[in-house]
Amino acid sequence: MIEKYAEIIGEDELDSIVKIAEKLKGVSVLHVNSTPSGGGVAEILSKLVPLMRELGIETDWKVIRGDKDFFTVTKSFHNSLQNGFGELPKGAFEIYNKWQEINGNELDLDYDIIFIHDPQPAGLIKFRKKGKWIWRCHIDISNPYEPVWNFLKQYVQQYDSIIISSPVFGRDDLIKPQYIVPPSIDPLSIKNRPIPEITVRRILYKFDVDPDRPIITQVSRFDRAKDPLGVIKTYKLVKRHTDVQLVYVGSPASDDPEGEIVYNETVQAAGSDKDIKLLMLPPNSDLEINAFQRGATIVMQKSIKEGFGLTVSEALWKEKPVIGGNTGGIPLQVINNVTGYLVTTPEEAAHYTLYLLRNTNIRERLGKNGKEHVRKNFLITRELRDYLMVASLTGS
Ligand code: UDP
């Protein structure tokens, strides 16, 4: 299976990955996160873990458990760390610590290298018996809400090294090595591999979307950081000038209890417009996501806060120009007038959407550039190599 990537990245790149992996033979590796599906972290781990195993590295993936109170707390951490302000549920720190205890006592954490993904399981470091521990932070921690960051930092400081997604997230109050590893997409997955045009059309028809009329698509959990209301506003501004449909595709994630509330807010904002499709798909609807991204005329990722935004690379890989929020990891992927346009307001987003809808040749140019940009920088093989490097450096 791993040999198949050679067609996309070349033999030399693949050889270098195999060589680094050889150094880790006999080393046991564990990844821990907070949901088996939904969201970017689960997406990456579901591809990365089998590849690490295929390279002969003994690798496991474990998911912590928690109740609604715990995930409400961790979602409030997530929001306040990214927004720089926030309101925490009563007893938030105690609830967080209680579930670290429960998981720490239940999970076997006896591995040589442990990657802990994001804040939700960060406190498990208290249960370290052996091995090197790496905190892999996928979110924007450049301007955190201090009470939450100070709480979390007591754990983060105990790790041997830290991985962040973009240089702009680097923190000078952490003394541990901080490695920059942007996330990535798997070009061979059902979500990203080429599919026949007829399949794209069939899936669009199935959801009552007309493949022959222009389509703006945003694929995102229903999360305020993804600005679904801003997407609706953008669409409405564009619709005043030209014919267009909006498809917003989301799906639930077990560690995001706000999804339903935000979905309802979005339904309200959409009103009765038949050209707006708000779709709540079951988790792992990968073929449908592939089709909606390929069927789009323009892909939007109008986030207000974003760790990276895998959906941007997924769209660029399918040669779609992306209009992306100028935040977090999106500017690594959206380069103005090269792969898409960076925006802040719905007005700016509408301006570039109209511009792109009216200029097929520019859409095509940006789309082609986008695919090359992703090939060079944001494929799973590059992230795999980076993880192996960080594991070797931290372990030695
Ligand atoms: N995703 C999905 N179905 C949906 C919405 C999102 O499969 O209905 C996927 C999306 O294709 C991407 C991941 O979930 O692979 C979201 O990752 P991203 O980094 O964009 O955002 P996050 O949810 O981690 O904040």
Image (cartoon, rainbow, N blue to C red):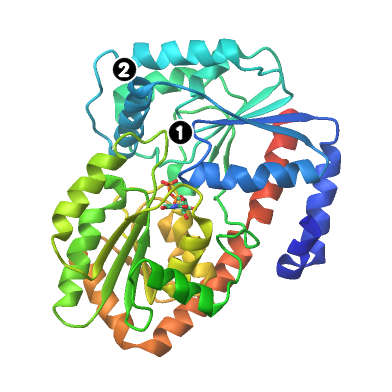
Question: Where is residue 72 shown, x and y percent of the image?
Answer: 32, 27
Q: Nearer the viewer, residue 255 or 8?
A: 255
Q: Quadrant for the N terminus, please.
A: bottom right
Q: Disc 2 or 1, which lies upstream in sequence?
A: 2
Q: Quadrant for the C terminus, please.
A: top right
Question: Where is residue 187 shown, x and y percent of the image?
Answer: 62, 62
Residue at x-position 45% and y-position 58%? 311
- Disc 1, SS: loop
Q: Measured along the vertical axis of the image, is residue 114 above or below residue 334?
A: above
Q: Nearer the viewer, residue 145 or 101?
A: 101
Question: Where is residue 177 shown, x and y percent of the image?
Answer: 59, 33
Residue at x-position 51% and y-position 72%? 370
Q: CA distance from mark 2 to mark 1?
A: 26 Å
Would residue 119 be visible to someone looking at this image? yes
Q: Which residue lies under the disc numbered 2? A: 92
Q: Residues within 10 Å of mark 1 (few under 14, many from 20)?
A: few
Q: Which residue lies under the disc numbered 1? A: 172
Q: Nearer the viewer, residue 283 or 60?
A: 283
Kindly identify the amino acid type of the residue bearing the numbered disc 2.
Ala
Would residue 345 be visible to someone looking at this image? no
Residue at x-position 22% and y-position 72%? 350
